[in-house]
Amino acid sequence: MLKPATTDIEALKILDDRLRWLSSWTIHHANHVRESDDGLKVGGHQASCASMTAIMAALYFHALGPNDRVAVKPHAGPVLHAIHYLLGSQSRDALENFRGFGGAQSYPSRTKDRIPVDFSTGSVGLGVAITLFASLIQDYLSAHGWLDEQDRGRFVALIGDAELDEGNIYEAIIEGAKHDVRNLWWIIDYNRQSLDATSADRMFERFDEIFRSCGWRVVELRYGKRLQAALDKNKALKAWFEKLSNAELSSLHYQGGAAWRARIEVELGKQAVAFLSGHDDASLANLFTDLGGHCMESLVEAFDAAKDDVPTLFIAWTIKGFGLPFAGHKDNHAGLMNPTQLASLRDSMAVREGEEWEPLEGIGDNARTGVEALLDRTRISREKRPRDFGSVAVPAISAPTGDEQSTQAAFGRILLDLSKGGSDLASRIVTTSPDVTVSTNLGAWVNQRGLFRRSDMPDIFAQAKIASAQKWSGGNKGQHIELGIAESNLFLMLAAAGLSGDLFGTRLFPIGTLYDPFIARGLDSLNYACYQDARFLLVATPSGITLGPEGGAHQSINPPLIALGQPGLRHYEPAFADELAAMMEEAFRLIDDPSGESTYLRLSTRSIAQVERTDDRWREDAMAGGYWRREPEENAEAAIVAMGAIMPEALAAWEELKDDLPGLGLLSVTSPDLLHRGWTAAQAARWKGQRNPSHVEQLLSRLSSSAGIVTLADAAPASLSWLGGVLGQRVAPLGVDRFGQTGNLADLYAAYRLDGAAITEAVAELLLPQ
Ligand SMILES: Cc1ncc(C[n+]2csc(CCOP(=O)(O)OP(=O)(O)O)c2C)c(N)n1
Ligand SMILES: [Mg+2]
């Protein structure tokens, strides 16, 4: 009778071959078989796929449970598609259309692929780190009673070794160590090659040390069973093998058995005679490719042995392009087999011509039953998780009272009120900040709701009765996750928390705060969060030169332009507290709306006189991107358009100029982003015959077609200058286009031309004959 374990190992080996074949074929088909209309190279990474088919076979068909979530090395996407193809959850159509419009995506995509993709990947390093934050969110949900024990899982990242150069990985593991992160498996496809060439040897065994010092278990899978046995028998051979540099090793793998023999003969002489005489060239090459990451027994053993929750780094040695003709060649990253090479791989895999897509093609009858049984038993989800986590009521949010307020202070007050209100929404808010909790006004919220820690953290200062405005104790019911100063981590945390519904079936409302200029520090992580449709509220404050004495290093200039070009993120910039309240309400609604998005609020520390409203009419327009703060007369010849914290200057200039310029309007822009989007969407709709003018067109059509507009923003002038393109009106854009400096507001606004004098000059230039 066969032992079941042996059967599984054999079946896994067969599946490893199937994955190597199907991933190679999918890429080949897209490049060499499918018709090309435009002659563009399609591309794909056969070598990067072949490198980790054994690892992925062992993982998906053996180790993963139904709740485990995986971030797949981006250029191994075709292997993931092949896995789902074998499981019946990926269609042949999608594979035939790999990298085509609507086909299987080049890099796994949560939103665009039809198979369940837990985390999108593409920008290397980020997919790795998001798993760590997702694991923290899992602990957060468990601690708050939102996730049952049986629904918890492990978070796995499949990593290219060159990804380890991305600094965001180390920022993440440092943060993870502080939070005692667990249930992580990071598996390195250690093929010692990157995109350009073989990787530097000098980091050898350094990665282990770095991870160990952050509390990780490191498991190195250097040799497969056969190679281990051979090297154990011959110490000289082992020592020699282990001294080979990455480049030497790869070049030998590429050259094959004869090259191994020649090198060993020269360098080991008598010490290796017996060893060499026991192998012909083919068996030598085969033996030396038996590295840990290609040895099914070693992989299964290692995964089986790591079932506790200690975060574990597996370093699985592999050969880039394993089993393919360019295995080990330093230039193989984007290498594609030619049709002859592909045909020979096909023959070696016993795949009949014409049957290339047949899932279990080439598997003999005896083995087939075992393979099918293993596929049946595979525990990963075959379907995308339904979006059925219900919706959360968003209560009306009212503006804090006070004649003079800054938007930053109002933000803190609104959160405090929410906290005291005790709504379902408030219990689902999780705040996070990279060491700027207090200075972005989250303090009062944290005093109410506490820091999140898996184990209790006393506030030592409070215990010692030292006076402080800030309570700083933590426990497992806390709702604020404090991060170190690493903005990339903030965005990855927002990404993970913002996917809590999709990943865990419970919607959280994540709010992250940071200083506006430091958005740029984590920009790719922010883009990454938006790319996979994570939902959150980003509050960036302080902002602009309105920050005054803090100076140029902290005064942001271009984030509104970043937001203008960032899909999935809505920029709002309020001037007054009531606008902010409406925006926060909208932002929460958008988090929960299946077709919503994330929101970026750009706030300020400048306290300004609030408006008295006589009605609510401004609100709808403000939420759409702008409203007339001072209505223009029909066909007015001039308007001031202003955004955010410099509204007092705009209002004062309006007062000053209104008598000389009858009918002068003052447009308050609350979101250049929304106005611009509406404008381009309306244009696109017009091409399809729909004639509804966009909000910005409606607003500006109140002015004469030759009107002059002065735009004013404490930001890059291009944030608003484009308004002139909407109806062809003339624009004088005021804003900040040089680095800021220290100073009081009057001095700074004068120096950077944001004051009344600048507005008057700009209006004059537009309207008076020169
Ligand atoms: C942030 C980022 N920079 C650059 C790239 C381009 N790129 C894609 S793969 C790669 C090298 C990958 O090497 P490795 O991680 O070792 O993967 P392998 O293909 O060897 O498995 C690079 C530089 C990218 N995808 N993301
Ligand atoms: Mg590599």
Image (cartoon, grey):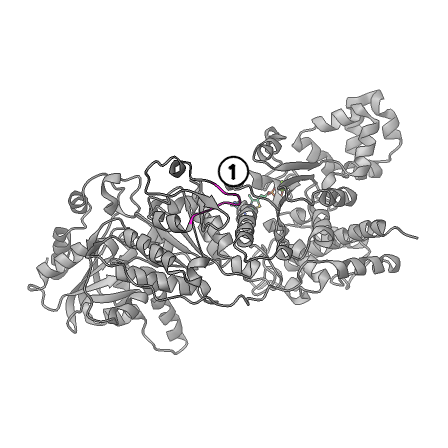
Frontmost residue, 713 versus 155: 155
Q: Residue at x 32, y 54 (%)?
A: 411
Q: Does residue 365 appear in this view?
A: yes
Drawn side of residue 320 relative to residue 656, left or right: right
Quarter holding residue 320:
top right
Residue at the image position 68 percent from the left and 65 percent from the top: 92
- From the viewer's side, name the closer residue of 354 and 669: 669
Circle 1: residue type = Ile
Answer few, some or many: residues within 10 Å of disc 1's Cα (few below 14, many 20 plus, some between 14 and 19): some
Identified at 68% across, 37% down, the residue is 219
- Give the main secondary structure, helix, strand or loop, of the magenta stretch: loop
Q: Which quadrant holds residue 365?
A: bottom right
Q: Which residues are magenta?
A: 450-457
Q: Is residue 454 magenta?
A: yes
Q: Give how far across and how far down residue 735 sits, in percent.
A: 23, 51
Q: x, y percentage for residue 121?
A: 56, 52
Quadrant holding the C terminus: bottom left
The answer to which of 633 and 635 lies nearer the viewer is: 633
Q: Which residue is mark 1?
A: 174
Residue lying furthest left = 659
User: Can you tell me which quadrant of the image ligand 1 is in?
Assistant: top right
In the displayed structure, does residue 761 sit left or right of residue 438? left
